[in-house]
Amino acid sequence: MSFFHQAYVACFLVTLTLTLQSVGMSSLIHWIKAQFPQGIQQLGLFRTFVLVVRFTSLLVCLHILEILLWASFYRWKCLPTWEMAFYFSAANYATVGAGDVSLQLMWRVMGPVESVTGVLMCGLSASFLFAIVTRLVQLRDPELLDSQRTASPPPEVRNQPTNCLANLPKAASVRSRS
């Protein structure tokens, strides 16, 4: 088995994972638009809480689907049981690592590739949740975010020079040898 074949399989799985993540996140956006056609500005505290819990739960389900995608590859090509394949995939996706399970030598590159992919997908989900919560806070209390943007920095920061190079020592002049 050549390295190019492994790289092709890895790229294929990464592409499928990214596609799942993108479709899942866009489906969540369409779902929230359908659930709240009048917008989310009129949600009370409890409904806001429920919305964030539902979004988070659906994102966790999305990550489980992505783990199952990788686990199905491991089950097909590398590992004897579904339980072992899911365990190995989940441990790598979450970057914990499965020290008690290892892949065949020709497929060992897949574990680190899944780890990097898992970190990136979790980062996408975290930024998505952050955007949702920021929007909910902005709608609930617009002055809260604006006051943080326009607040003046503390006195010790205000008196600092804005040029980061201003604090560096001056370079000694170079004397020419005559």
Image (tube, rainbow, N blue to C red):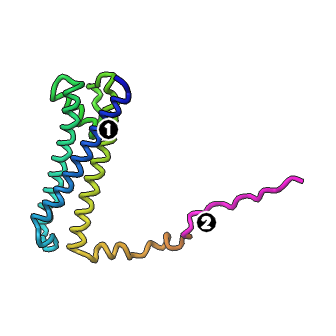
Q: Where is mark 1, residue-wise? A: 11
Percent coordinates x, y for residue 6 in the rendering: 33, 30
Q: How crowded is mark 1: few (under 14 residues within 10 Å), some or many (20 or more)?
A: few
Question: Among all residues in the image, which is located at the extreme right?
Answer: 178
Residue 166: give its label. Answer: 2
Residue 35 in percent (x, y) is at 9, 64
Q: In which quarter of the image is residue 166?
A: bottom right
- Residue displayed at 23% across by 75% down: 141
Quadrant of residue 25 within the rendered picture = bottom left
Element under disc 2: helix
Q: Which residue type does callout 1 highlight? A: Cys
Q: Is residue 89 above or below residue 166?
A: above
The amino acid type, in three-letter code, at marker 2 is Ala
- Quarter of the view holding residue 136: bottom left
Q: Is mark 1 on a helix, strand or loop?
A: helix
Numbered marks: total: 2
Q: Is residue 66 magenta?
A: no
Segment colored magenta: 162-178
Mark with earlier residue (2, 1): 1
Which image quadrant: the C terminus? bottom right
Q: In this view, does 167 lie to the left or right of 41?
A: right
Give the percent coordinates (x, y) of residue 176.
84, 55
Please give left or right for residue 177 compared with residue 65 in the image.
right
